[in-house]
Image (cartoon, rainbow, N blue to C red):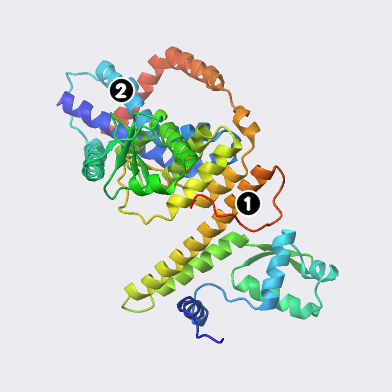
Amino acid sequence: MCRGPSRTDRMTRTFSIFGSSSAPQLGPLEQLLLREIWARGNATVRELLDDGKLRQAYTTVMTTMDRLYKKGLLDRAAEGRAFRYTPRLTPQELQRGAALDGIRQLLGSDDTSALPLSYLVEAISAHDAQLLDELQLLIDKKRRELKTGEPDTGRPRRKENL
Amino acid sequence: MFVLRGLAVSLTFFVLFYCLLSALVSISWRGLRWLHTTERRRADLLFLLRVLPLLASVIITFAFVVPSFQLLEPRSIDEGMGTMPAALGSGALFLIFWGCYRVVVAQRRTSRVVARWIEGSRPFEQGRTSLAFRSPREAPPLTLVGMRKPRVLVSDSTVELLTESELDIAFRHELAHIRSCDNIKKLVFRLSPFPGMAKLEAAWSQAAELAADDAAVTNVHDAVDLAAALVKLSRLVPVDAPPACTVGFLNGSLSARVARLLAWDDSRRLQRDGIPGWAALPPVIVAAFCICFAYGPLLDITHEVTEWLVR
């Protein structure tokens, strides 16, 4: 059955529509290169290509790295005729910044700020309920393990206490 | 004039030390994250750091500034108060009154809310503790209330929702808070306001919760029961924003607490703290000796700084 988009889906789409967001918008290659730099700590374009994971041309990678530098996500220092790139932010810092920016945009999106705020509260409540369900599953699993004395393999859940 | 000048100079020193130490603490407390120690010790250290600016400023003012002014300032000279001591002294008075006002407001608000929760409550013993009370009114699930006579207030819905063993371990958790006077500590925080301390207080709150978890749990079954109680009570809709001087059962990060309890290892209970308590003794003795021998010169230096400030 095909259903229309939920309110949360619409909200997610709203976030992605904000092209004018102050948070940097990243393409697939930019994300890939950023992950590589995070994994390595620092690298030159040649080192990234020598790894064999990238199929792109040297100039493509160089241009993309330059774009990441201009977006303020990488630092660079001259090393011979090339640049050595280092990440300016950790993955957590980038994620946090993007989330905060999204929330700020949402809350300040129009004059009736109570409406976006109610979406946010709804999304958080749904997330909380899901988190509690997940934690309850873990507790039930642990109880089964303690009862049988061996690690649980995912048998059907027994309703307990509640 | 002499007394007024002395008061202004003392208050000036107090506010300068207080602001300097508070700024240092608000920057440096995060270093404790890398300290390998028990949660109880971590909570104690965070509390000590939080109150250190106020405590140290009061000690320095009364141990050095006031005696140096009394002993070394000539009473015969008719000197003005000086702009700087007058301004900073007023700032210090404002800070002191602001701290006291925050304490009084927090205490009054807490008393008002707790009186409403506790109305019609009855002792709830069932082989547990005489400090437990069951509230028929809309109260938070499980809360530690009261300063002089601390009590654990439990709501009807909590009693219905939790099993016997879960309720028992939840009570033990709250009793651990009573033993470490956590609600009084929360009130003490109000006494010393300074921007940027909220994160330190949140870190202390989380460490105090984990420490109470550790004190309550004796084996892996207790740990699972406590985790189950946390998850069950988190589903209850909060009735009121808890007032400042109460300690709720659901404080701190729920997922972090549950994950920690589910990974409980019985050997953790026997784990000794990395830093023994007596380790603080040698530095304290050395500092006391240094202060004793250097007290005279320190008073001289303090008086010179006083003179510089007044001019």
Is residue B291 rendered to the left or right of residue B65?
right
Q: Spatial distance from mark 1 to mark 2, Cα to Cα?
A: 59 Å
Provide the residue designation for mark 1.
Answer: A141
Mark 2 crowd level (few <14, some 14–19, many ≥20, 10 Å Cα): some
Crowding around mark 1 (Cα neighbors within 10 Å: few <14, some 14 to 19, many 20+) is many
Q: Nearer the viewer, residue B180 or A145?
A: A145
Chain ID, mark 2 = B
Q: Residue B62 bears which disc, if any?
A: 2
Identify the amino acid type marked 1. Answer: Lys
* Viewer-side residue, B303 vs A112: A112
B192 is higher (above) or lower (below) than B297: below
B128 lies above or below A91 = above
In the rendered image, which quarter is residue B105 located in? top left
Q: Nearer the viewer, mark 1 or mark 2?
A: 1
Q: Position of residue B294 (x, y in %)?
A: 44, 15
Residues behind callouts 1 and 2 on a single chain: no
Query: What secondary structure is marked by label 2?
Result: helix
- The spot of residue B68 in percent (x, y) is 30, 20
Image x and y of residue B171, in percent: 42, 36
Q: Which quadrant is the N terminus of chain B positioned in?
A: top left
Does B112 sit left or right of A87 as displayed? left
Q: Chain of mark 1?
A: A
Q: Quadrant of the C terminus of chain B?
A: top left
